[in-house]
Image: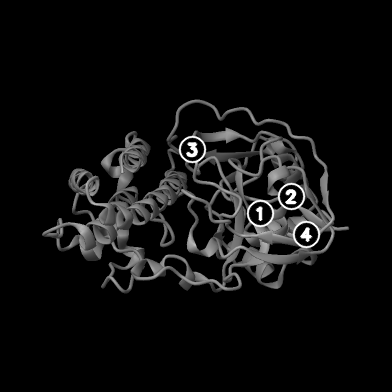
């Protein structure tokens, strides 16, 4: 329990550190229905520990505030009513100070519960998986804080920076292909003592792969500029039907947060564009992986490049040898988000965590630089609808041998 208590304190402190540079005004707005205010993320992650750890295990449990039960429920129907997701930004009260008080109060109660578990083996065994899940859940929201905040700040005409200074220089990774013979391989989380995986990462199972090769690095800004210069967004033959409709309806001409500079050179030059980032508006680095792409854009680029997107099984099988597999950009795959053979959701209310979203979404693999340290792993399955762009999502190419 001591180790788990230290990890709990570290994860919770990191969330607070992410919010520390922000004003109350920064933490309040909701930029679109798919995003959430920073204040809501701070409260919801606390609600998770109160609801799934304290309520079933704390002697004499009482809600911190009865209204929070509804206000900060995300999608757990078995828990009860939820405040409408598109209206999270309208919850001006409780204020940020009250939400931080809520976090401290729940942290104190969790600490007391963990202290009690030191002398109660049964309680310790019950708490460990729930607290571990809660910490993994909070790490997901740490990434969402940055993702949602970037979208919010991008809509401010002042284009404020969350972080001061220029972006770190991108490392140039040689292009190329990594060949794989295919055959019968195993994917999915392999249980190990002390290891963690979400329920959708298993069970481990066998899949057959045809011979393939996969890109030795992610697609870069410079390569994406070439796609734009070649009329990639104007040529319907590269696009899925739904993607072409999406391009027309949204007027998309470049990745999200890119802007063509009026004083820049010709349309084929990367320097004709800049991008809004957590460091404010910045010039595009040629070797940096392109990000903030929809599945439609990633798929269209792959077709234009004479390649395709990898399946998630190909990606996972190859991941150990892949440069830029983690910490740069989530990578779209060609795989729909569905259950693995033999999948069973977790028992109880937390069983709503992943399984009920297995429809009309596509898997992304890897992680981005917004992903907390230690949160990524080869079997991790991220997933979003095809039109999602505000995530730190890029692509890696694949092709058949």
Q: Which residue is mark 3?
A: 278
Q: Which residue is mark 1?
A: 253
Camera-side mark, 3 or 1: 3
Secondary structure category for the residue under label 2:
helix
**Left or right of residue 378, residue 177 in this image:** right
Quadrant of the snapshot with the N terminus = top left
The vertical placement of 398 against 203, above or below, is above
Residue located 76% across and 66% down the image: 208
Q: Which callout, 4 or 2, points at the residue further toward the start of the chain?
A: 2
Q: Which mark is residue 228?
A: 2
Q: Which callout, 1 or 2, points at the residue further toward the start of the chain?
A: 2
Residue 69: x, y in percent? Answer: 22, 64
- Tell me the distance, in whole angstroms, between the alpha carbons under discs 3 and 1: 22 Å
- How many neighbours does mark 3 have within 10 angstroms: few (below 14), some (14-19), or many (20 or more)? many
Residue located 88% across and 58% down the image: 401
Secondary structure category for the residue under label 1:
loop
- Tell me the distance, in whole angstroms, between the alpha carbons under discs 2 and 3: 24 Å
The reply to whether dot 1 and dot 2 touch (C-beta < 8 Å) is yes
Q: Which callout, 3 or 1, points at the residue further toward the start of the chain?
A: 1
Q: Which callout, 2 or 3, points at the residue further toward the start of the chain?
A: 2
The reply to whether dot 2 and dot 3 touch (C-beta < 8 Å) is no
- Tell me the distance, in whole angstroms, between the alpha carbons under discs 1 and 2: 8 Å
Residue located 56% across and 30% down the image: 167
Camera-side mark, 2 or 3: 3
């Amino acid at each position: 329990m001591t180790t788990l208590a230290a990890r709990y304190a570290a994860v919770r402190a990191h969330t607070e550190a992410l919010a520390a540079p922000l004003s109350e005004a920064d933490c309040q707005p909701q930029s679109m229905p798919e995003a959430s205010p920073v204040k809501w993320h701070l409260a919801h992650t606390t609600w998770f520990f109160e609801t799934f750890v304290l309520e079933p295990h704390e002697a004499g449990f009482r809600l911190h505030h009865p209204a929070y039960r509804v206000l900060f429920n995300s999608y757990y129907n078995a828990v009860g009513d939820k405040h409408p997701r598109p209206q999270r930004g309208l919850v001006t009260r409780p204020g940020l100070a009250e939400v931080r008080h809520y976090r401290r109060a729940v942290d104190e109660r969790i600490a007391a519960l963990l202290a009690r578990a030191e002398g109660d083996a049964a309680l310790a065994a019950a708490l460990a998986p729930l607290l571990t899940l809660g910490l993994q859940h909070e790490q997901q929201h740490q990434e969402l804080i940055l993702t949602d905040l970037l979208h919010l700040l991008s809509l401010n005409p002042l284009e404020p920076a969350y972080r001061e200074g220029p972006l770190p220089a991108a490392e140039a990774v040689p292009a190329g292909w990594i060949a794989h013979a295919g055959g019968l391989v195993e994917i999915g989380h392999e249980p190990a003592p002390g290891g963690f995986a979400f329920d959708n990462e298993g069970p481990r199972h066998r899949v057959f792969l045809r011979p393939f090769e996969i890109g030795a690095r992610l697609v870069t800004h410079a390569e994406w500029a070439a796609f734009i210069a070649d009329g990639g967004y104007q040529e319907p033959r590269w696009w899925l039907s739904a993607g072409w409709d999406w391009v027309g309806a949204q007027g998309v001409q470049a990745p999200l947060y890119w802007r063509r500079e009026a004083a820049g050179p010709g349309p084929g030059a990367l320097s004709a564009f800049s991008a809004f980032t957590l460091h404010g508006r910045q010039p595009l680095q040629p070797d940096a992986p392109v990000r903030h792409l929809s599945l439609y854009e990633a798929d269209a680029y792959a077709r234009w490049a004479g390649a395709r997107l990898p399946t998630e099984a190909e990606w996972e099988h190859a991941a150990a040898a892949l440069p830029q597999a983690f910490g740069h950009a989530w990578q779209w795959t060609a795989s729909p988000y569905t259950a693995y053979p033999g999948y069973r959701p977790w028992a109880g209310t937390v069983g709503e965590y992943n399984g009920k979203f297995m429809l009309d979404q596509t898997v992304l693999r890897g992680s981005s630089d917004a992903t907390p340290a230690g949160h990524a792993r080869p079997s991790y399955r991220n997933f979003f609808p095809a039109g999602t762009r505000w995530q730190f999502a890029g692509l890696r190419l694949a092709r058949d041998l």
